[in-house]
Image (cartoon, grey):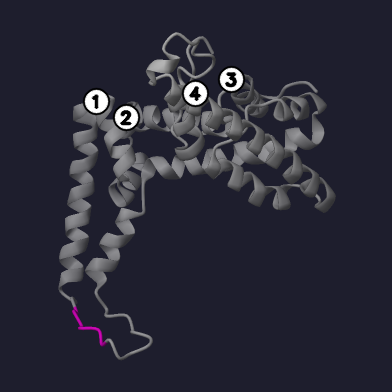
């Protein structure tokens, strides 16, 4: 099929030959979202309105800090703090703290609006929201390509598998994106790819460990030199792109 604009990043992720092309897609979207957040957009009113309200999660505020635009990040955190403090001060006026009884099977809400508000802030993030919106479309596109494009289907089958989290995601999403028979076939193929490649990385990791034994000092590394990084990608979805890829 003729490649369309929205299929390009999906195909590129599967061309990369990493241990999880879905991680590769996510990483690409995340980098774009971080660039957008600390680009000229952070001075735009509509963007600041959202960042002031939702703030950033622990992971992404750390990544934004690493990017070096200290002033841009400081401005966003300052106005977010202004809004947060204003909300907390308003809710403190109606603060109710009720000791919960251990004898009650179902404890009613204690009316602590301050805690509820701050708990909500811990689960909201401007960067996460931008990523999720695009990532969902990429996953839908991947399933569309799998169903419609024979070349992509072969590319999928010849991939290096998926991390734990994204293998689970694909199993759940396939029933929504594909017909019953196609979803069953996809799940079987996806599971075979996952197991084969997870075992491959497990074996590479085992040889990596053996290489620290003096008895194997003179033995070749085979494909195990970066087995630790690839294993972290498989188990924990930590993006890793091998050199020369």
The percent position of residue 232, horizontal first and vertical second, equals 44, 33
The percent position of residue 134, horizontal first and vertical second, equals 54, 38
How far apart are the two marked residues, 2 and 1, measured between alpha carbons?
A: 7 Å
Dot placed on the residue nearer the N-terminal end, 2 or 4: 2
Residue underneath mark 2: 38
Q: Are marks 2 and 1 in contact (CB under 8 Å)?
A: yes
- Disc 3 is placed on an element classified as loop
Dot placed on the residue nearer the N-terminal end, 2 or 1: 2
Which numbered disc, 1 or 3, marks the residue closer to the eye? 3
Q: Quadrant of the C terminus?
A: top right
Disc 1 residue crowd, few under 14, some 14–19, many 20+, Cα 10 Å: few
Residue underneath mark 3: 16
Which numbered disc, 3 or 4, marks the residue closer to the eye? 4
- Disc 2 is placed on an element classified as loop
- Disc 1 is placed on an element classified as loop
Magenta stretch, residue numbers: 96-101
Left or right of residue 75, residue 209 in this image: right
Dot placed on the residue nearer the N-terminal end, 3 or 4: 3
Residue underneath mark 4: 207
Dot placed on the residue nearer the N-terminal end, 1 or 4: 1
Up-down relation of residue 95 to residue 62 (above or below): below
């Amino acid at each position: 099929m003729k490649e369309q604009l929205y299929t390009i990043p999906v195909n590129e992720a599967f061309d990369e030959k990493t241990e999880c092309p879905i991680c590769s897609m996510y990483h690409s979207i995340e980098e774009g979202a971080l660039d957008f957040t600390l680009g000229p957009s952070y001075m735009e009113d509509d963007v600041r309105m959202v960042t002031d309200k939702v703030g950033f999660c622990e992971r992404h505020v750390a990544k934004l800090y690493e990017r070096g635009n200290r002033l841009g990040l400081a401005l966003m955190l300052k106005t977010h703090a202004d809004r947060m403090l204003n909300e907390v001060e308003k809710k403190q006026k109606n603060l109710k703290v009720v000791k919960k009884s251990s004898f009650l099977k179902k404890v009613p809400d204690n009316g602590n609006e301050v805690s509820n508000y701050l708990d909500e802030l811990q689960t909201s993030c401007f960067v996460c929201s931008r990523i999720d919106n695009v990532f969902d479309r990429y996953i839908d596109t991947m399933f569309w390509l799998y169903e419609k494009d024979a070349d992509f289907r072969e590319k999928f089958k010849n991939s290096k598998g998926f991390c734990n989290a994204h293998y689970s995601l694909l199993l759940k999403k396939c029933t929504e994106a594909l017909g019953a028979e196609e979803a069953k076939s996809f799940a079987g193929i996806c599971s075979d790819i996952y197991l084969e490649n997870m075992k491959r990385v497990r074996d590479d990791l085992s040889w990596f460990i053996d290489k620290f034994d003096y008895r194997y000092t003179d033995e070749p590394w085979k494909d195990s030199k970066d087995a630790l990084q690839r294993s972290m990608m498989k188990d924990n979805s930590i993006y890793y792109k091998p050199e020369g890829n």
